[in-house]
Amino acid sequence: MAIKKISEEQYKKHKRMLAKLTDSQLKEMQKIEREAIARFSGNMTTLMSALGFLRVGYEVGWRVLIIAHHKTTIKKYESILNIDIREQFPEEGSGADRSIGLKVAKSLNKFWEIVRGQKKIEGKGDLS
């Protein structure tokens, strides 16, 4: 998938939407990252994906993550990071409204059907 070019105005809007993490949250995230890196053995791209999952999770929240990822992928990343996403991340982060999947799920009132794969939607993992 190609990266979509956004306008300067969109960029500034997205930048304002970024989560304002506390020093405590930043330290916790760094601790999780460092522990995951120290304990990990396996394909490095899997570790890198899990670390990105951690970073983005704070921005969008766990509801967006479970729409965008299959449950086995989530379990794999939770294991690598030694976290439970529902405890680690907000239900919806400051950037959750950018999620195409969450927007569609809310408009159709079919969140869990989309999560379970009973209702298919195009671009459910995309951000606007």
Image (tube, rainbow, N blue to C red):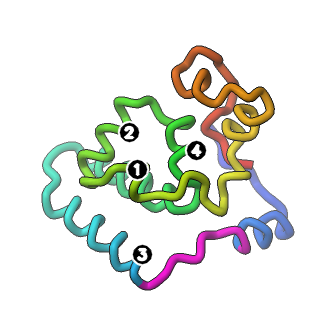
Quarter containing the N terminus:
top right
Please tell me whether residue 21 belongs to the stretch shown in magenta. yes
Report the residue marked by disc 3.
Answer: 25
Picture coordinates of residue 71, whole percent (x, y)? 40, 30
Dot 2 crowding, Cα within 10 Å, few <14, some 14–19, many 20+:
some
Going by the numbered disc 3, the residue's amino acid type is: Gln
Asked if the residue at tag 2 contacts the one at tag 4, i.e. Cβ–Cβ closer than 8 Å, the answer is no
Which of the marked residues, 4 or 2, is nearer the chain's N terminus? 4
Disc 4 to disc 2, C-alpha distance:
12 Å
Name the residue beneath numbered marker 2.
Answer: 74
Q: Position of residue 43 (x, y in %)?
A: 23, 43
Look at the numbered discs 2 and 1 and tell me whether their residues touch, using CB distance below 8 Å: yes
Residue 85: numbered disc:
1
The numbered mark, 3 or 2, whose residue comes first in the sequence reads: 3
User: In the picture, residue 108 is in which quadrant?
Assistant: top right
Q: Is residue 12 left or right of residue 48?
A: right
Q: Which residue is mark 4?
A: 64
Dot 4: element:
helix
As helix, strand or loop, the secondary structure at mark 1 comes to helix
Identity of the amino acid at label 1? Ile
Whole-angstrom CA distance, mark 3 to mark 2, is 21 Å
Residue at x-position 68% and y-position 45%: 99
Q: Which tag is nearer the camera, tag 3 or tag 2?
A: 3
Q: Main secondary structure of the magenta part?
A: loop
Alpha-carbon distance for marks 3 and 1? 14 Å
Task: Answer with left or right where residue 17 lies relative to residue 55.
Answer: right
Q: Is residue 117 left or right of residue 36?
A: right
Indicate which disc residue 4 carries: none
Give the amino acid type for the residue marked by disc 2 in the picture: Ile
Alpha carbons under labels 1 and 4: distance apart: 11 Å
User: Regarding mark 2 in the picture, which secondary structure is present there?
Assistant: helix
